[in-house]
Image (cartoon, grey):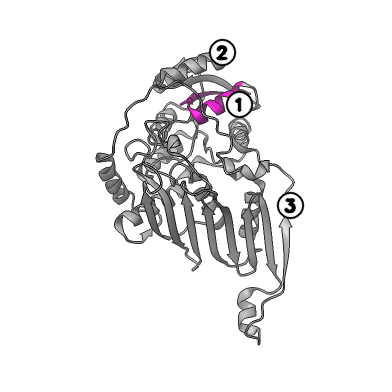
Amino acid sequence: MSETVKVGIVGIGNMGSAHAKSIFSGNIKGMELAAVCDIAESKRLWADENLPGVPCYEDYKEMIDSGVCDTVIVATPHYFHSPIAIYAFEKGKNVLTEKPAGVYTKQVEEMNAAAKKSGKVFGIMYNQRTNPKFQKMREIVQSGELGELKRCIWIITNWYRTQAYYDSGMWRATWASEGGGVLLNQCPHQLDLWQWIFGMPNRVMGHCKYGHWHNIEVEDEVTAYAEYPNGATGAFITTTGECPGTNRLEITGDKGKLVWEEGKLTWWKLAVPEREFCVTCKEGFAQPEMTVTEVETDNIELGHNGILQNFTNAILYGEELLAPGYEGINGLNISNAIHLSDWTGKPQAVPVDGELFLKYLNERRATSHVKEEKEDSGKIADLSGTYNDRWKVR
């Protein structure tokens, strides 16, 4: 087996260009930037200037068919993630897709099937899984140290975006081109972590507001309620129209509570499980004794490069993937269920009814406003401060 992964990147906009520059700079051991591809001439001109010597294609099929790469990173607008990945799998390529896995679950099921048939390595850019605090939360929850799970609440409202952000690209914030708003663009990481740490709900009720804070078609404010097989409940609240915002994840179990906020993880441990205390205590207003500790972790968050390195190691050495591509459908199931619940006014089962969701989505796509194309200078946006990590620079 080759000791170098030769990767071609489809889509060199904001995220694709960041991956390209990192790989080109040698930050990923064992991965070589073999080619890039973009339909926009301005992006290809950017590549010629910033990635000297790297072949640049306009057609992703031509790049994949050329044999220049054995691995493909998909960093295009959302609707194209699945079809490009499927084509790459059919040509025997490993695939790492950007989030979300797709816009609707039926599309992603087809991608997962193509990946399975190919037998190639399949990953998704869930870079927040590299956060040691989230890893620790998952470890505590899954070990049973928090006891029987009761509730999970995520308030993630620090996605503030201006109108200029939504006006910056033709594909943004339309049903036809993006397929959704804050749920599909900003929140795939949180929806993934929600289920990765706490588990998948079996029923969701969602309420969305569309173009509430911005001149857009899609949702920019969401409140969702979730139910779980064991009787636990959850809430997920998000928006791009609130400033200052909050990013707080709280998980409660029979034996205590975990809270992650501003990069700090706090653990409340009960001396006696709450259910046991409730039925044995003879005092009406008593509480179990508890200890409160701040959980420290040794390792650091590796972010996008951590996923790229793990993906490379999986190809070369069989390392276990931190973010398998097959799991991209989990968060999308929750997202689709929230939308479908709002559209129908009824709670939705999870996994979602993919055919019904697509029917309602297609109705919105059919009347979606197509933005006028603006002159594209090829300027790559500064993404610093967009990953909910502002607490790091206080």
Q: Could you tell me residue 270's position as x and y percent?
A: 69, 70
Residue drawn at (32%, 49%) of the image:
357
Residue 376: name its quadrant: top left
* Furthest-bottom residue in this view: 282
Residue, disc 3: 296
Residue at 71% across / 72% down in the picture? 271
Question: Does label 1 or label 3 sit earlier along the sequence?
Answer: 1
Is residue 1 shown to the viewer in this render?
A: no
Mark 2 touches mark 3? (CB < 8 Å): no
Disc 1 marks a residue whose amino acid type is: Ser
Mark 3: few/some/many CA within 10 Å (<14, 14-19, 20+)? few
Q: Amino acid at mark 3?
A: Glu
- Other-residue count near label 1 (Cα within 10 Å), few / some / many at <14 / 14–19 / ≥20: some
Q: Earlier in the sequence, mark 2 or mark 3?
A: 2
Left of 201 or right of it: where is 179? left
For label 2, count other residues whose C-alpha is less than 10 Å away and answer few (under 14), some (14-19) or many (20+): few
Image quadrant holding the C terminus, namely top right
Q: CA distance from mark 2 to mark 3?
A: 43 Å
- The residue to which callout 1 is attached is 22
Q: Amino acid at mark 2?
A: Pro
Picture disc at residue 52: 2
